[in-house]
Amino acid sequence: MESLLNPPLSLKSADLQQHWHELAVEERKPFFFSLASDEAQIFFKDLSTAEQLDLIGDLPDAERFAWIRLLRLDDAADLMQKLPEEARHHTLALYDERTRRELIGLMAYAEDAAGGLMNPRYIRIRPGMTVGEAARYLSSQARGSVEIVYYAYVIAADQKLVGVISFRDLILANQDATINDTMKKNVVSVPEQMDREEVLGLFSKYNFVAIPVVDDEGRMKGIVTYDDLAEVAQQEATEDMLKVGGMEALDAPYLKVSFFEMIKKRGGWLTVLFLGEMFTASAMAFFEREIERAVVLALFIPLIISSGGNSGSQASTLIIRSLAIKEIRLRDWFRVLRREIMTAIVLGAFLGLVGLLRIVIWQHWHPIYGEHYWLVAMTVAFSLLGVVVWGTISGAMLPFILRKLGFDPASASAPFVATLVDVTGLIIYFSVAQSLLRGTLL
C-alpha cells in the first residue's frame, strides 16, 4: 500500500478492506480517515466493535458521538460499554432523552445475553387494526429509525407479544381484515436473559431473519437480527477453538491482551495438564519392575499413549463440534457411544496390525526385540486396540458428561483428553504385557 504518512486521496473502501488486517492498529487511522465521508461511514459500520473502538476511542466527545450515532442502538450500546466511564458519560449526554434511556437499558444487560444483542426499535402494530390501517402505519414507522426486517410484531395493550405478520402477508391480505385474524400467533421468542449461543442455535434451527425478545411476563423488549449475531458467531467459534486447544478464551484481540493476562489465560490449563501428566510418571513408577525386566517394552510407550491420545482428541473434537451446532443432543449419547466403539475397534485393529507388522518386519532386518519378538508384537497390537478403544470412548463421552453437569463441552479439550488417556494407556499396556509375557520376559 501507499506510504502510511501519505495515504492516497483517491483511496477506496474496497482497497482498504483488502489490506485492513495487514495494517497495525496505529496504521489504520490515516487510511480510514482519508476515505470519502459516505464510504467511511459504511466501512465503519461493518467493522467489529473492537476495531471501531480503536478508530474513535480517543476522539473528542462530539466527533466520537458523530460516529457512534451512525450505529444501530444495539451496536452503539456494545461500543459504549467498552469506552472509559468518563467518555461513556459524555457521549450519552449528547443523545436525546428517549435514545439515552434505551441505550442505558441495553447496557444493563449482560453482553452475552439476548437483551444485550437486541434492538429495542422495531415495527409494531396493534391486533385490532385492519390490514389497511396497519400498512399505512407501517409506512410511517419505516421512515423512522426502526429495525426493518420484513416483519411487523403485533403488540397488545399490555405490551405483550401476541403475533407476527410479514410485509408480504400485509400486501396480499384483505385490506379490511383485522390483524388479529391475519397474523401468525405461534411466535418463537427468546427470554431477555437467554445466552447468545442458544439464540444463535435458534437462528440455525429455524433459519430466522429475526427473533423477538420478551421479558418474564411476555412483554416484548426488542428484536435480535441475524446480522447482530455475525460477530457473536465468530466470538463463540474462537472461544471454543481456544478451549479445545487447552486455554481460556481471550477477552480482547491477541495483540491487546497484556503479557501477564496472557500468562494467566494459558498458565492455568498448562498447570492442570502438567499435574495430570504427573500421574503418568506415577504409573510408570508402578510398573518399574516390568520395565527393568523387559526394557524393550519402554520402546513402545510413546507409540501406545500417543495413539490413545490422538484417538481421544479426534473423538472429543468431533463430538464438541456436533454438540455446538446441534447435530446431536444429550439424549443421543448411547447412539454416539455405540458408533464410536465400533469405529474405535476397526481403527484400533488397523493400528495394531500396523504395529505388529512393523515389529516383525523390523526384527528380520535389525534383530533388537529378542527371541520373544512375536509376543512383544502381540502385546503392542492388543495394547493399541485397547488404548484406541478406551481413548475414543473417553473423548466421545467426556463432552456429554460436561454438558450434563452444566459445563461447556469445549472444556473437554484435546490436551485434556490426551492427558487422561496417557495415564490409562500405560495401565492398559502393562496389563496386557503382564498377561502375554508372563513366564517369558516377565
Image (spheres, rainbow, N blue to C red):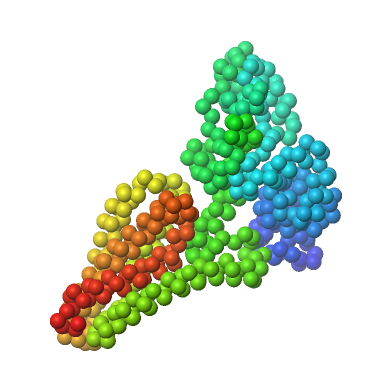
Query: Furthest residue to the top?
Result: 176
Does residue 432 appear to the left or right of 276 in the view shown? left
**What percent of the width, then of the height, locates residue 10?**
77, 55
Q: Nearer the viewer, residue 160 or 367?
A: 160
Instruction: Please give the name of the residue rendered at 44% of the width and 60% of the height, measured from the top-left corner.
Output: 412
**Along the horizontal axis of the image, is 128 left or right of 427?**
right
In front: 38, or 435?
435
Q: Is residue 272 visible?
A: yes
Which quadrant: the N terminus?
bottom right
Q: Residue at x 48, y 40 (%)?
A: 205
- On the question of residue 320 being in view, the answer is no
Residue 183: quadrant of the picture: top right
Is 27 or 215 nearer to us in this picture?
215
Question: Where does residue 433 sit, x and y in percent of width and height?
Answer: 22, 76
Residue in view at x 48 percent, y 69 percent: 272
- Residue 349 percent coordinates (x, y): 24, 65
Above or below, 373 relative to 52: below
Residue 369 position within the rendered picture, expressed as x and y whole percent measured from the top left: 22, 85
Tell me if residue 223 comes above or below residue 61 in the rendering.
Answer: above
Note whether 229 is above or below 314 in the view shown.
above
Asked where in the image residue 382 lies, by quadrant, the reply is bottom left
User: Which residue is found at the position 32% from the left and 59% from the top?
Assistant: 393
Query: Which quadrant would the C terminus be assigned to in this image?
Result: bottom left
